[in-house]
Image (cartoon, rainbow, N blue to C red):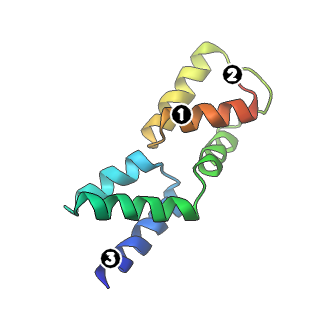
Amino acid sequence: DKILLMSQSFSEKVKTKRIGPLALRSEISQHKLPLELLNKLIDDIYQQYSISELISFHLVKRKILKNRVLSKKDQNRLNNYLKRKGFYWDSILDVYNEWGIL
């Protein structure tokens, strides 16, 4: 089944690149899939991979420490990095609050 193969392929992309739903949507949309199928693929993939865990991975990778407030400059850089990785602002804020870095 072509859809199952695509799902596995994109799931692997999320696993290796740790990209967010916006970036994944951009990559999948190149395949001209119906919107309903595109949304289902994205929902299925992010049920496997927690968005907050993916964002947390990037924070650890960037050596961000929990419960330590970032300077405005560092926070802007981190915000832009996570947005480029394809995460929604609401998801980013939730993780920031969990980590106590706002």
Residue at the outermost right position: 67
- Spatial CA span between label 2 and label 1: 13 Å
The image quadrant that residue 72 belongs to is: top right
- Spatial CA span between label 2 and label 3: 40 Å
Check disc 3 and report the residue beneath it: 3
Residue at the outermost bottom position: 1
Q: Quadrant of the N terminus?
A: bottom left
- Spatial CA span between label 3 and label 1: 29 Å
Q: Height in image: 42 above or below 87?
A: below
Do callouts 2 and 3 mark residues in contact (Cβ within 8 Å)? no
Query: Is 89 on the left-hand or right-hand side of 63?
Result: left
Check disc 1 and report the residue beneath it: 90
* Mark sitting earlier along the chain (2/1): 1
Q: Height in image: 88 above or below 54?
A: above
* Mark sitting earlier along the chain (2/3): 3
**Kind of residue at disc 1:** Asp
The image quadrant that residue 7 belongs to is: bottom left
Is disc 2 placed on a helix, strand or loop? loop
Circle 1 packing at 10 Å, graded few (<14), some (14-19), many (20+), is few
Rendering coords of residue 93 (x, y %): 60, 31
* Mark sitting earlier along the chain (3/1): 3
Q: Quadrant of the C terminus?
A: top right
Is disc 1 placed on a helix, strand or loop? helix
Mark on residue 102? 2
**Kind of residue at disc 3:** Ile
Residue at the outermost top position: 72
